[in-house]
Image (spheres, grey):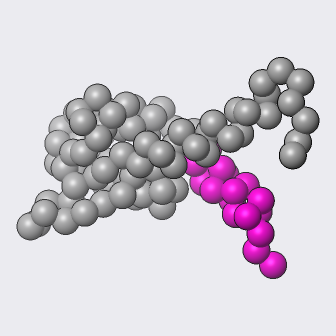
């Protein structure tokens, strides 16, 4: 049985798992500071790891929903999903503000 609360916890788990690796956090920062969109090749050039490693990290970010992908000819353009990131983490962090009781 699915519920919005359960869906929210599953999304939080995916986001936290994606953020667990420093390279994935760096990719998100690079996307943010480069206007929110970059090609896979441009992202890979910014990091010293091999393409299969970069591809694996990008796939995990995509599976978490933190980035979306669109095709531009043969290129894959990765787009930062800021709203999902801020909403998912913001909702979780809200529990730690002051003496807030669950709704």
Q: Position of residue 69 (x, y in %)?
A: 30, 60
Which residue occupies 19% across, 50% down?
39
Residue furthest to the front: 103
Horizontal side of residue 2 vs 39, given as left or right: right
Question: Residue 57 in the image: x percent, y percent?
Answer: 41, 49
Residue 10 is left or right of residue 98, and the answer is left
Residue 53 in view (yes/no): no
Instruction: Please state which of residues 99 and 30 is positioned toward the viewer in this rendering.
Output: 99
The percent position of residue 100, horizontal first and vertical second, equals: 86, 30
The correct choice, above or below, for 80 with respect to 35 in the image is below
Furthest toward the top, the residue is 98
Magenta segment, which residues?
Answer: 1-19
Vertical comparison of 50 with 30: above or below: below
* SS majority, magenta: helix
Whether residue 29 is visible here, answered yes or no, is yes
In the rendered image, residue 2 lying in the magenta stretch gets the answer yes
Q: Residue at x 29, y 29 (%)?
A: 33
- On screen, residue 9 above or below 100: below
Q: Residue furthest bottom?
A: 1
Q: Quadrant of the N terminus?
A: bottom right
Percent across and percent down for residue 97 are 78, 24
**Residue 10 part of the magenta segment:** yes
């Amino acid at each position: 049985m699915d519920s919005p609360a359960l869906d929210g916890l599953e999304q939080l788990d995916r986001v936290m798992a994606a953020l667990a690796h420093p390279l994935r956090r760096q990719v998100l920062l690079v996307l943010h500071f480069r206007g929110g969109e970059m090609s896979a090749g441009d992202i890979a050039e910014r990091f010293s790891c091999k393409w299969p490693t970069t591809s694996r990290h990008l796939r995990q970010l995509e599976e978490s929903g933190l980035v979306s992908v669109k095709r531009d000819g043969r290129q894959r353009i990765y787009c930062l999903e800021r709203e999902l990131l801020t909403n998912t983490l913001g909702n979780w962090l809200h529990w730690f503000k002051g003496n807030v009781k669950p709704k």
